[in-house]
Image (tube, rainbow, N blue to C red):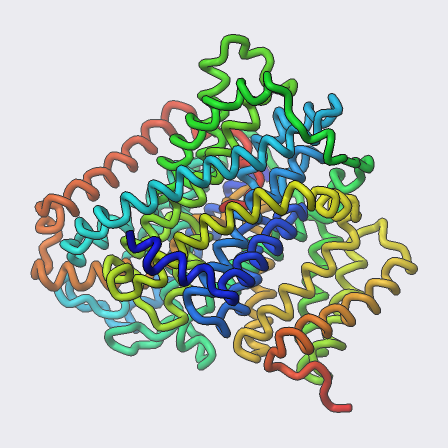
Amino acid sequence: MRGDLKNAVGGGLVMALGLYALVSAPEFGIGTPTNMGAGFFPMALGICGLVSGAVIAVPALFRARTVPQFQWRPLAAVAAAILAFGLVSSAFGYVPGVAAATLLAALGDRRNGPGSIALLTVAIPAAIWLVFHLGLQISPPAFKGF
Amino acid sequence: MELFTIGFPTAFSAEALLYCFLGVFLGTFVGVLPGVGSLAAVSLLLPVSFYLDPTIALIMLSGVYYGAEYGGSTASILLNLPGTASNAITCLDGYPMTKQGRAGVALFITSVTSFLGGTIGILLLMSLSGWITQVALSFGPAEYFAAMLFGLLAAATIGQGPPTKGIAMVVAGLLLGTVGAEVNTGVRRFDFGYFELFDGISIAIVAMALFGVSEIIASVNSPGATQDRVSVSLRSMIPTRNDIRRSALPVLRGASVGSLFGALPGTGPSIATFMAYAWEKRIARQPERFGKGAVEGIASPESANNAAVQTAFIPTLTLGIPGTPTMAIMLAAIMVHGLTPGPGLIASSPELFWGLVASFWIGNVFLLVLNIPLIGLWVSILNIPYRILYPTIVCLICVGVYSLNNSLFDVWILLILGFVGYVLRVLDFNPAPLLLGFVLGPMIEENLRRAMLIARGDFMVLMGRPVSGTLLWMCLALLVFMAVSAWRRGNRYGQAVSATDE
């Protein structure tokens, strides 16, 4: 594909967001300028989104090629870590959740060997338990279901 | 006067002193870490502040803020890796000084100039706030709408990156802010049926996702993570008489630039440091010394940085309008405790304002006094490889978000927005205007609605009033300026500098 893809995709996403807002606005009730309904502001913003997105995306299609560079490994690692945190914490408490998250997050950097990962998976949950359970006494349970 | 009758007694309580120190210490610590900026630091500690008295909460969060800005300069000088975006300028002359063996002097000078810049900023905060509050008390919804709109447009057009992208991000942020039940009619907008979204998305999650998570993903595997070990001794920190002589005026110039840009909405420490450096270089007798370890090149930006951090509180505390995302978090902290930001805040809660101002003095002294002996600690932290640090930060963010409402839903929001934030970064879109739009959105809508109701649907009435009219014309001027620049330079503003913002 030709064109400045970074800006084309970015502008396109903003346009899509604006379009969605514009389409959804009427169901909230638009009202009049004097008596604005809940949909008035989203409608106005939707239009702004379409315009500002277009201003970015359209010229971009004619410019020099740029391609967005994703770092897949860190992205996958961190996303998996947060996902794992959520799933494990809901079942077993946040300390096991942190252990799962640490394991997956650490895999994001190629330089982390099994030794480092193992060490982190033990050390970080322990530190988190100290700070958040003993220290700050936050409300979610540290361990549950055992 | 109130500073001494109300401010210092509040700030000198044991609890206040403890949290001020804690904030400054944690802030410097986090500021030293690459990949986590002052905004992420303040957002991370926002949940902790919920359990504290509002004045203490703000004292701590502010300490984190200016501590992080200072800590970032340490990383810039020693490793050429800015800890926060506004410290990027300090790398230019700070790192060469390290290579010349003058790291200690550089660190000492930045400590002292930060302190002096901060002092000047605080003095301005104290003297101008009363006057601005008086003016602001006559503000009606039209004026608030115009002021907030101007602040948003300024943030979008003057900040990093091309203005068109900034505006697109502001619009996206405003839309994100509409999620939840609308205040007047109770109509639920964009919540996809999830009752958890009734009150909208929590700002702490948005901030941590857009700035924390995405920054980490972008920083892992980056080449800067391998570094030579640096050590700094106390004796090596003493500057020469020449250094002191050369730094004196730059400190004042930097502080003036910093105070101005800090107080203006939309600009903050980043722009201030850049402008201060540019000014020094332009008026220097030997500009070729810059970039090779010129002391003026760190004295002025650091003074500007700290002055900007202090004066950023002026619009936030007097008008209730945050100029930067970090100030938006401060506002959130104020609102969470049930206080209403705006011109009435100083009058209704004088112990909050004056206690905070007094704590700035104390905190800046802490920064100065502590960071000189503690330099060894910060240096050893910088020697920890990033690949070990970042899983810790990811876990901190996860637990912090989870503990906000004991809700798993928030973690999923973190995941989604974190992914979105990373996509924005990869596409070179700066997320800072998005956060500002998100925070100001509900207030802008509310004020616009009221203003239009009063004006009976006639927008021209808003243009006719003196204050709101002037501001709205300035908004128009900004848009025209943006269109003209874009036309002339073909939208080529160069790469957006790293997207962490204040």
Camera-side residue of B90 and B426:
B90
Q: Residue at x 42, y 43 (%)?
A: B166
Q: Is residue B134 left or right of residue A67?
A: left
Q: Is residue A9 visible?
A: no
Q: Residue at x 53, y 46 (%)?
A: B365
Q: Position of residue B342 (x, y in %)?
A: 27, 59
Q: Position of residue B25 (x, y in %)?
A: 61, 54
- B231 lies above or below A83: above
Q: Is residue B341 visible?
A: yes
Q: Is residue B135 left or right of residue B345?
A: left
Q: Is residue B75 left or right of residue A46?
A: right
Camera-side residue of B264 and B339:
B339
Q: Residue at x 39, y 60 (%)?
A: B331
Residue lying furthest right in this view?
A115
Q: Position of residue B109 (x, y in %)?
A: 59, 30
**Quadrant in the rendering for residue A80:** bottom right
- A3 lies above or below B11: above
Residue lying furthest top in this view?
B285
- A36 lies above or below B29: below
Q: Position of residue B340 (x, y in %)?
A: 30, 66
Q: Is residue B283 left or right of residue B244?
A: left
Camera-side residue of B118 and A126:
B118
Camera-side residue of B107 and A34:
B107
